Amino acid sequence: MERAWWKEAVVYQIYPRSFNDSDGDGVGDIPGIIEKVDYLDELGIDVVWLCPVYDSPNADNGYDIRDYRSIMDEMGAMADWERLLEALHARDIKLVMDLVVNHTSDEHEWFQKSRREEDGYADYYHWVEGDPDKPPNNWESYFGGPAWSYDETREAWYLHLFDEKQPDLNWRNPDVREAIYDVVNWWLERGIDGFRMDVINLLSKPEGYPDGEVAGYPTGHEHFVDGPRIHEYLRGLYEETFAHYDVMTVGEMVDLDVETANAYLGADGDGLNMVFHFDHTFIDFGPEGRWDVGEWSVSDFEEIFTEWQTGLDETSWDGLYWENHDQPRVVSRFGDDEQYRYESATMLGTLLFGLRGTPYVYQGQEIGMTNADFESLEETRDVDTRRPVEIMLEEGEIDSYEEIRDVVNYRSRDNARTPMQWSGEDNAGFTDGDPWIKVNNNYTEINVEASRSADRSVWQYYRELVDLRHDEQTLVYGEYDLVETPDPLYAFTRTLEDDQLLVVLNWSDGERSPPSLSIENPTLLIGNYEDAEARLDSALRPYEARIYRL
Ligand code: TEU
């Protein structure tokens, strides 16, 4: 196993819109992040992944880019971004930017030229001529509805796997590929430390746009997920850009399985450093899919994590996450956000940091922020909540928002996007103005100030986890082996040469007998109930988590 700085790093993800507002317009901004750089330093993280801050009309909060080379007005100016990079680097924190190149905004100059068929731009996107009442095929958008919209200017259909304001770039066109290499190199030249690559396994679409035949989410996925020329495109991108810099890349890949991940990763693959896969985020989908909540068990997680931990090959590496700006809050989802909020948030943190791969902590996760309550559809902001709910209303699947409210509160991406709770002051200390999205009502109780001043808090525990990860190479590089235990216990070892660690979790709100292991008095490295009872042979209390050195 080759060593690398990005394997040893702990990454912290910032969703800038909701992190910290410095100028009172209700939207987080780059100067606001600069104010919190010391906070990040104290948490001890090594890398910041910054979600899009590029110029954008914000149909999808920056994932619809109008200009790759400038900063969104609401978030500041390029000079602010430069100060941010400097401030992070001065504290030895690296900066990873978001690369969104499956699509642009329809307001991007390229699309404007393409819809007018200007010289050299006609084939920048996926255009199909035909009957304005009949889309070219049955492909669906990830946000619901057809993946095609008719453009009156060009009198043709264009493809958008996300919102209609996010037309997909045509990677079959070599000019598009060159233009993207230029964008990537432009940012690498400015001294950034890598990219998180948005839906990067969707780049390749087959010629002729065949209808989707396999049921699934969304229709057509078998044609555009891991499409026919995807490896050629990613390999080309790598060779023209990343290969020349000491940077990290993490590919967000939808519907990814382990074998396919191996083909993308490492120098023998397409040169990507690690992936985000989604398997563990589907565990609680109901029979109706995403807008339905299903049953899950600890062994479902064991199975998925074990498959990934043991199935990735020597040159592959995993990106570990519970939360991001698209996922609800993990303590509400897989823990207990009331009585055992501290215990379950820290148990889930122990698991995240106990696995092999690079852990990603999403803003607010380190203080155990919870899901919110969106009392009406008007209180939600996310296109990927509003649109699916509007479709359900239009199609008569539901009669009112109230019928789906609990599922929205459970699943919506907006749960992750409520403002960062800094203090018990107005608007959780996020803004002096009106926040662009509601602040979670529980901010007076759950906030950074409270979590940092308490002796026992989610923040203090994450702080320790970060240290542990830095101190224990076995946690980074050690091999993973599942230890058979009955549900709801989950245990595994990590082994590096002659060093061995044991991670034991009780994923439930009841007390459980310890696993029966014939191991003598191991040393406790970390535990979320710090007392003399945390012996290997003593019962595990609700959501108790421990890591031992054997
Ligand atoms: O997400 C891709 C993606 O798979 C999600 O849109 C997913 O379908 C949805 O969250 C339901 O789980 C990336 C970005 O992370 C997301 O914020 C963007 O909206 C999307 O791509 C389009 O750029």
Image (tube, rainbow, N blue to C red):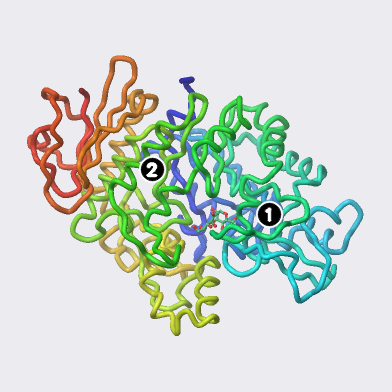
Residue 30 visible? The answer is: yes
Label 1 CB sits under 8 Å from any ligand 1 atom: yes
Which mark is on residue 103? 1
- Left or right of 454? Residue 317 is right
Quarter of the rendering containing residue 263: top right
Q: Which one is in front, 500 or 292?
A: 292
| Residue annotated with mark 2 | 304
Q: Quadrant of the C terminus?
A: top left
- Residue 366 lies, in percent from the top left, at 34, 48
- Residue 91 lies, in percent from the top left, at 46, 33
- Left or right of 67? Residue 478 is left
**In percent of the image, x 46 and y 55: which residue is there?**
19
Instruction: Spot the residue most to the top.
Output: 498
Q: Is residue 38 above or below residue 6?
A: below
Q: Residues within 10 Å of mark 1 (few under 14, many from 20)?
A: many
Q: Earlier in the sequence, mark 2 or mark 1?
A: 1
**In percent of the image, x 48 and y 27: which residue is there?**
313
- Residue 145 lies, in percent from the top left, at 61, 70
**In percent of the image, x 90 and y 58: which residue is there?**
118
Quarter of the rendering containing residue 248: top right
Q: Is residue 184 above or below residue 143?
A: above
Which mark is on residue 326? none
